[in-house]
Amino acid sequence: MSGKRVKVMLVDDNMTTLLMGKNTLQPYYEVYPIPSAQKLFEILDNVTPEMILLDVEMPEMNGYEVMRKLKQDLRLADIPVIFLTSQNDEGSELKGLSLGAIDYVSKPFSPPLLLKRIENHLLMASQKKELKNYNDNLQEMVRYKTAEVVDLKNVVLTTLSELVEFRDGATGGHISRTQEYLSLLVAQLAEKNLYQEDLLFWDLNIVFPSSQLHDVGKIAISDVILNKPGKLTAEEFEEMKKHTLYGVEAIERIERRTKEHDFLKHAKLFALSHHEKWNGTGYPKGLKEMEIPLQGRLMALADVYDALLSERPYKKPFTREETEHIILEGRGTHFDPALVDVFFEMSDAFATVASNKEYDTPTRVTTKR
Ligand SMILES: [Fe+2]
């Protein structure tokens, strides 16, 4: 470390020390000889040095107090400080070091030794700074790359889910809207401390995007059934029911090729259980009440609410009143009663999402971070 651009402040009330220090350091550093603590802080308002050499015994504010004050100021806390101690300051070295000084030099100092100490500490400080910058950059790069990967994954997922959705004859936006409905329900559940035993373990940045795959199994259902304008025959309905199981199969195929199991675990539960009903008359397994995973209970409500309000090949959209009436009728039969109650507390927010045309844009990506 050399060159006059490196600023070293020397603080001592003893003029002889100041003068000697200044003469020693001046050929190598930009030296600030400073006679008092008060003067030091005045100068620090405008100049940030690379190092401070600080006398312990000074009138008014001594070296320890200066040290404490430096450490309390975020801008100044990292400036390396070397204490200048007199031989009769017993224990002052230890006290200085424990307050955060990086070293001490006994007075009267030997000029070559003082210079060597300063050089070593400046080198260490600059290496520490470089390492910190390197770490910060690395962390920033990892954050950026992770965000890129998450974005890409969500775009692929959304696009895949939309392709399935379009085959279903839906007008678009179902995937985005259902995620919004889920997030409204979950927010209100959290507010009321309901189902915390599940929600506490959920990373919502994973759970909401994973819900997009709930109908992915429809890819394996024929167009004739998916887009049939009238009622499905019993046989056709049996085939239609299988989209839940086909969905799980598709997700399991992904699962075998990746390590990201948490996302896929949630996705499978959404796909498998979103057509189960609270009273056990749903499909594919006929699960009942709390046997149905919370993912399925939530999606059942969000999915039906959105389907009722949307136009489909076989039906006109229902009005908000009709839709809410059907949801209420399904309380405790189709839907989890606690979720229906939470829904009615949020029904205005649901209606706002339902009427927001922005969700109809097919390329909308609902990345949440
Ligand atoms: Fe479905």
Image (cartoon, rainbow, N blue to C red):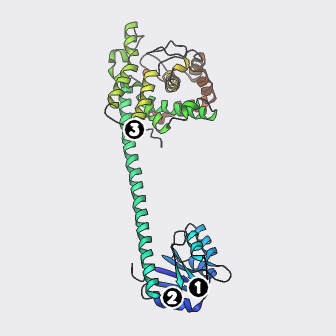
* Residue that sits furthest to the top in the current view: 234
Residue 356 percent coordinates (x, y): 51, 34
Of the pair 202 and 93, the residue shown nearer to us: 93
Circles 2 and 1, Cβ within 8 Å, touching? The answer is: yes
Q: Which residue is mark 3?
A: 154
The image quarter in which residue 248 lies: top left
Q: Which residue is mark 1?
A: 12
Q: Is residue 176 above or below residue 77?
A: above
Between circles 2 and 3, the one closer to the viewer is 2
Residue 297 percent coordinates (x, y): 52, 23
Q: Is residue 118 above or below residue 359?
A: below
Marker disc for residue 191: none
The answer to whether residue 174 is visible is: yes
Number of marks drawn = 3
> Which numbered disc, 1 or 3, marks the residue that appears first in the sequence?
1
**What element does badge 2 sit on?**
helix
Q: Which residue is mark 2?
A: 21
> Which numbered disc, 2 or 3, marks the residue that appears first in the sequence?
2
Picture quarter with ligand 1:
top left
The image quarter in which residue 214 lies: top left
Kindly report the distance in space between the C-alpha atoms of the residues bearing marks 2 and 1. 10 Å
Kindly report the distance in space between the C-alpha atoms of the residues bearing marks 1 and 3. 62 Å
Residue 9 percent coordinates (x, y): 52, 81
Of the pair 300 and 318, the residue shown nearer to us: 300
Residue 252 percent coordinates (x, y): 35, 27
**What element does badge 1 sit on?**
loop
Tell me which amino acid carries mark 2.
Gly
Circles 2 and 3, Cβ within 8 Å, touching? The answer is: no
**What element does badge 3 sit on?**
helix
Kindly report the distance in space between the C-alpha atoms of the residues bearing marks 2 and 3. 63 Å
